[in-house]
Image (spheres, rainbow, N blue to C red):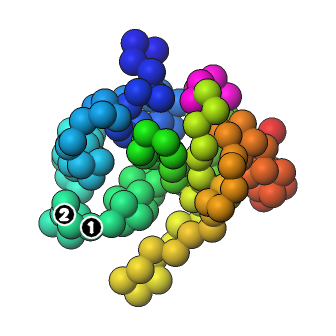
Amino acid sequence: MNKRVIDSKVTIIDESGIPHIMGNVNEQRLHVKYLLDYIHLNFPSINTDNLTVGNVRERFAYQISAFGDIIYFNDMNFGMFYFPNKLTDEQLETLDNIDLGNQKIGICYNLKEVGKNIMFRTIGMDNDYTLKEAIEEYMSGMAVKHHRR
């Protein structure tokens, strides 16, 4: 990878496991602006009228995870991953190879739209999880349901 995920503002890992690294964590540009650019570039037929800068991250994460992509928001001291309903082997391989050092992260998964709200389950929101630790907990709970590993 030319750019490191730990230095990015937003990274999207597509179904093929390719990380799309956007921006720098120190930039003032909003995370959602990168996501709007990504959607317009990669999914031009998708109507984004209901996705605006004022939307919360979960709304964007829900939309992008519907495409099967993983989203990573980097807030310097804490990172947040949003997982689609099923991870591919390629995405799992990429996650295994991402070096976030000891950055604390959370994982949101099982995203569902309930009325106007996006609901999800979480790992690592109130704890000091590294990516490796959070992935291990996620896989131990989800392995039987969704994944081949």
The magenta-colored residue range is 93-100
Identity of the residue drawn at 63% across and 67% down = 121
Prevalent SS, magenta region: helix
* Quadrant assignment for the C terminus: top right
Q: Estimate how packed mark 1 is, as few (under 14), some (14 to 19) or many (20 or more) residues with alpha carbons within 10 Å.
A: few
Q: Residue at x 41, y 27 (%)?
A: 7
Residue ID at (41%, 87%): 115
Callout 2: helix, strand or loop?
A: loop
Q: Are marks 1 and 2 in contact (CB under 8 Å)?
A: yes
For disc 2, the marked residue is 52
- Residue 90, image x and y in percent? 61, 30
Residue nearest the observer in this picture, 32 or 15: 32
Is residue 46 visible to the viewer in this orientation of the structure?
yes
Q: Is residue 120 part of the magenta span, yes or no? A: no
Nearer the observer, 25 or 3: 25
Q: Position of residue 59 (x, y in %)?
A: 36, 66
Picture mark count: 2
Please tell me the numbered disc located at residue 55. Answer: 1
Instruction: Categorize mark 2 by other alpha carbons within 10 Å: few (<14), some (14-19), many (20+).
Output: few
